[in-house]
Image (spheres, rainbow, N blue to C red):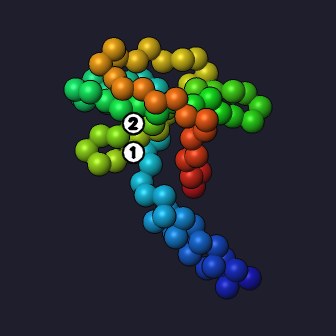
Amino acid sequence: MAVAHVAHIAAVANAIKANGVVISLEPGEWMKLLKRSDNPLIVIARGGTFRRKYQYVTTYRGLAFFTKSEHPLVLPGRAEVISAKSISVPDI
């Protein structure tokens, strides 16, 4: 049993390394982060199994920031927006 637990933790650690760091924020905090960027690049997708949500990813100082919202966010006009089919964020 302990061996299986250690193997699971190792698999999770490897998944984090493979995916990099993704920081999840509440929509309001995510919008504050956008104000710090001159020309933010934003990737948008609709996701969710039972309730469809808007998903957003942007980068700031080399880190990726993610948020999701039931309603579309009002993005700044200076933003470059890419519509994606899906966004996959590790849920750890």
Residue 27 image point, x, y percent:
46, 26
Local secondary structure at mark 2? strand
Could you tell me which residue is drawn at 62 percent across and 29 percent down?
Answer: 46
Looking at numbered disc 2 in the image, what kind of residue is underneath it? Thr
Precedes in sequence: disc 2 or disc 1: 2
Q: State whether residue 66 appears in this view.
A: yes
Which picture quadrant has residue 84? top right
Could you tell me which residue is drawn at 35 percent across and 40 percent down?
Answer: 59
- Indicate whether 5 appears above or below 51: below
Could you tell me which residue is drawn at 39 percent across and 36 percent down?
Answer: 58
Nearest the eye: 43 or 52: 43
Which picture quadrant has residue 53? top right
Q: Residue furthest right?
A: 50
Q: State whether residue 29 appears in this view.
A: no
| Residue ID for mark 1 | 64
| Residue ID for mark 2 | 58
Residue 61 image point, x, y percent:
25, 44
- Indicate whether 28 appears above or below 89: above
Looking at numbered disc 1 in the image, what kind of residue is underneath it? Ala
